[in-house]
Every structure is written in structure tokens, then in C-alpha cells.
Image: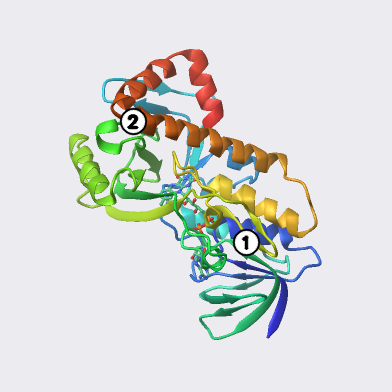
Amino acid sequence: MEKYDVIIVGAGPAGLICAEKLGGTDLSVLLIEKDTVFGDKVCAGGLTRKVLSIFHFPDNIIEHKICKTAVHSPRRFSHAEPPEPIMITMDRKNLGSFQRARLDNTGVKILSGTRVTGIKDGSLKTSSGEEYRYKYLVGADGYASIVRRYLKMPVKKKLIGIQYIVPVPGLDPKLEIFLDNGHFNAWFGWIFPHKDKIAVGCCCDTRYLSSKKLKENFHRWLERKNIDISKAEYQSAPISYDYRGLEFGNVFLVGEAAGMASGLTGEGIYQSLVSGIEVAGYITGRKEVSEEMKFVLRYNRIQARVLRLLLFAGPFRRIIHELIIILMNNKRFKQIINKGFS
Ligand SMILES: Cc1cc2nc3c(=O)[nH]c(=O)nc-3n(C[C@H](O)[C@H](O)[C@H](O)COP(=O)(O)OP(=O)(O)OC[C@H]3O[C@@H](n4cnc5c(N)ncnc54)[C@H](O)[C@@H]3O)c2cc1C
């Protein structure tokens, strides 16, 4: 049985960055990914400005640097053109290849097209029948994490995200958010611009709105907005926001396996990256929580509070949505929102 100091399960943003940070240390690192393509994940592909403090992306993998945003409620809208891009959009496979390339010459061994099928104390088994021993195990395997299941930690707080990828040649790259209690309850609809296509979608926690009802509402909303989905691709995936910590003895969880996404917006890439870096730090001997991790936990806590308020508001939610737009048309408040979300 081969033995590694660290085995990372899953090569999404969290696993890849954790491997990158551990590569080049004197630890032996094995990264196991079930797919052969890195980053082929259902996602709207929006990376908020915070991610740019971690990576400097080459221009050829950025689809749009978004400087135009609009937030709508059923009766009002607020338009903004911030001086700096509020978000960039990217094909997730390009993000995967970009991160994968950063592992070249780091000494990290990568096994792709190999699924982890079983975990025991100190060892794991893969779909190819091999067994590997580990000193530290990192679960970076997303929503349905086998490592999290090994820790007997069910996912109770989750969203379902649904979206269509709609071809739109020559589009005006604008990020649009739709607060609409009647269709999306406390959550919202989104339009993220990509190269000659848009990701139009929505999400919700199925404890408050069933996925069947969300899908019906979404289709009704798409019809009202005259968005033609006849040539579009439908996608759907769950998102975990059930965070219970990163460190469990010699086993760690990062990214969505740790429930690091926001329960309000479904944003998870930034949180996955920060938690991946954090755990690499713990494995190499850092004891204290980093400022970046404290920021992410605070950021998610604020969003959880907003979500609770919106859920608690019940029928008054539509009034809160209108109030948000009124406030967003105030210059000072617009700046705060712009800063907070990006
Ligand atoms: C519809 C939708 C839209 C979204 N839009 C955005 C957005 O615009 N911006 C944003 O920031 N976030 C968005 N998210 C959330 C974001 O996609 C995730 O939070 C993010 O991908 C989590 O990264 P991760 O590395 O933790 O996990 P993942 O990206 O899920 O990666 C996990 C990896 O583990 C692998 N794996 C799983 N099980 C095994 C196993 N047993 N053995 C080996 N490998 C395994 C998988 O193949 C995968 O490559 C969206 C999510 C959805 C559903």
C-alpha cells in the first residue's frame, strides 16, 4: 500500500488550491479526482472581485469583466456602473485547467479518473481497486463528500441551484439580479453574462420551497421575461451551506464538503479557495485562524443573518425587496453593497 502524508479527495477549486499550497513542501501529497476533466461543474461561473486577491488570471480565460449591474424587484430597479469590475465570469473548465497547471513541478501526484470509494482510519480505497494510506486526509469532494460521510456529518442546510445556459450572440455584459418573492421566495434569480451566452438561474433551500415548485416558478418567470430556452442547456446541482468546521483530528474538510458556500447567494468559489489555503496552513503547522478565513466566516454569517431576516419576514418580504432597491438607489448605500458583495 502506497503511503502519503496528505491525500486530498476532489480537484475542484478547494482541492486544487490546497494541493498547490502543500506542493513544494517536504510533505508527500496525492490528489484524487473522479473525473478526467478538471472543473466540469454546474456553476454560473461568477467570480467576485475577492478571488482576484488570490489569483492573477490571464485575460484569455476571463470571459467578461463586469462593470454593469442591475438589481430588480417586481416594481423597481437599481442600475450601477462601478469604476472597477464587480465580478468576472469564467468557464469553470478554464478555471480548473488554470489551477491544474499551477501544480506542475510541485511534486503533487495526481490521480484523475479515479473515484474514492471507501475510507477507513488511516487508509482509503479507490475505484481502481488500489488502497492508499494517509497521515492527513482532506475532503475537497464537494456537496456529496464521501469524506464528510465518513465523519458522519449529514448535510442539513442545502440549496438547489437550477439554471439554463442560453446562447445570446453579441450580448451586453451585464450582471442582473432579480429579487422576486412570488417566484424565488427569500432567494433570487440571476443572469450572468458569458461569451455569447448567459447563465440564467435561481436557487432556494428546499425546506422552504420545493425544487419542483422552484422549477415551475422559474419557468413561469422565464416566460414573463421573454427568455427563449428552446436552444438552452438545463443544469441543476445542490449547494451545501452546512458549515461545522474544517478540522476533525487528522481529517479536514474544505470548500463545499465543509459547507462553506453562502446560503443566501450560493456563492462558493471564493470560500472554497480560502478554506483550501487555510487547511494547507494547518497541515504545515499553523495553529491560528487566518484573517482571510475570519473574513469568510464573517461574510457567510452576515449573509446567513440577512437570509434569516428575509425568511422571518414572510409576506412582508416583498416590502423588504422594494426597500432594498430604494436603498440601492442611494449613492452611499450602493457603495456599501458594492464593497460588501465584491
Ligand atoms: C447552479 C449553481 C451556480 C453556481 N454559481 C456560482 C457562482 O457563480 N459563483 C460561485 O462562487 N459559486 C457558484 N456556485 C457554487 C460553486 O460551484 C461551488 O461552491 C464550488 O464549486 C465548490 O468548490 P469545491 O472545490 O468545494 O467543490 P467542487 O467544485 O464541487 O469540486 C469537488 C470535486 O470533487 C470531485 N469528487 C467528488 N467525489 C469524489 C470522489 N468520491 N472521489 C474523487 N473525486 C471526487 C468532483 O468530481 C469535483 O471535481 C454555484 C453552484 C450551483 C449549483
Viewed as shown, does residue 220 lie left or right of 1?
left
Would you identify the image quadrant in which residue 10 lies?
A: bottom right
Mark 2 or 1: in front is: 2
Q: Tell me: 220 left or right of 263.
A: left
Mark seen at residue 101: 1
Q: Position of residue 38 (x, y in %)?
A: 51, 63
Residue 40 visible? The answer is: yes
The answer to whether 325 is drawn above or below residue 117 in the figure is: above
Task: Determine the residue positioned at 35% across, 39% down.
Answer: 191
Q: Quick check: 108 above or below 220?
A: below
| Rendering coords of residue 82 (x, y %) | 50, 24
Q: Residue at x 43, y 19 (%)?
A: 328
| Circle 1: residue type | Ala
Q: Nearer the viewer, residue 249 or 292?
A: 249
Nearer to me, 175 or 13: 13
Q: Which of the 4 quarters of the picture holds residue 265?
A: top left
Number of residues whose C-alpha sits closer than 10 Å to that of mark 1, classed few (under 14), some (14–19) or many (20 or more): few
Mark 2 closeness class: few <14, some 14–19, many ≥20 residues within 10 Å: many
In what quadrant of the picture does the C terminus appear?
Answer: top right
Question: Sequence order check: which comes first, mark 2 or mark 1?
Answer: 1
Inspect this view and state whether residue 85 appears.
no
Residue 213 lies, in percent from the top left, at: 23, 46
Amino acid type assigned to the residue bearing label 2 in the image: Leu
Residue underneath mark 2: 179
The residue shown at (32%, 21%) is: 319
Split into 4 quadrants, where in the image is the N terminus? bottom right
Q: Secondary structure at mark 2?
A: strand
Q: Secondary structure at mark 1?
A: helix
Task: Give the percent coordinates (x, y) of residue 258.
Answer: 56, 54
